[in-house]
Amino acid sequence: MSLEGYKKSVAFKDLIDNQSVAVEVENMALLLHRRGDRVYATGIYCPHAEVRLDPRNTSGDLIICKAHGYRSNIKTGECMEEPDVKLNTFPTVIEDGFVWIKF
């Protein structure tokens, strides 16, 4: 697979299954969410109020904003409370033991 346009992030083995972590890739703050053998990347700010999301506030495939309780799907970015509001999501690939992100 071509990794053109993708940026190298953390080692896949360093991510704990069913947990989320904040990372910085080339000066861009992101959240990585490992679910089994997949990793999902999202923006770090709530799309509703620009509040920084806490990676510990995940439940399944949802991340919950501490400010207003808005829930966003980490896979699709869809907000459960306001369908017109969407969390930024970014394509990821696991290659050579690392997570690569395209943004």
Image (cartoon, rainbow, N blue to C red):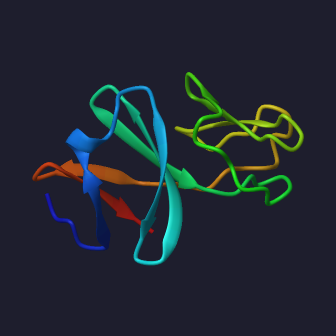
Residue beneath the point at 45% across and 66% down: 24
Image quarter (top left, top right, bottom left or bottom right) of the C terminus: bottom left
Q: Is residue 87 above or below residue 26?
A: above
Q: Identify the image quadrant of the N terminus.
A: bottom left
Q: Residue furthest right?
A: 68
Q: Residue 50, position in %: x, y?
A: 79, 60
Viewed as shown, does residue 16 lie left or right of 31? left
Is residue 10 left or right of 85 when viewed as pictured? left
Position of 83 relative to 92 (above/below): above
How many numbered discs?
A: 0
Q: Residue furthest top?
A: 60
Outermost residue on the bottom side: it is 27
Residue 51 horizontal side relative to residue 53, left or right: right
Quadrant housing residue 16: top left
Query: Is residue 27 left or right of 78 when viewed as pictured?
Result: left
Residue 20 in picture, x, y percent from top left: 48, 39
At x 65%, y 44%, the residue is 54
Q: Residue 68: give x, y in percent of width and height.
A: 89, 40
Residue 76 placed where, x, y %? 57, 40
Instruction: Identify the residue shown where x is 81% and y is 37%.
Output: 70
Give 34 or 87, whichever is nearer the viewer.
34
When asked about the image quadrant of residue 73, the answer is top right
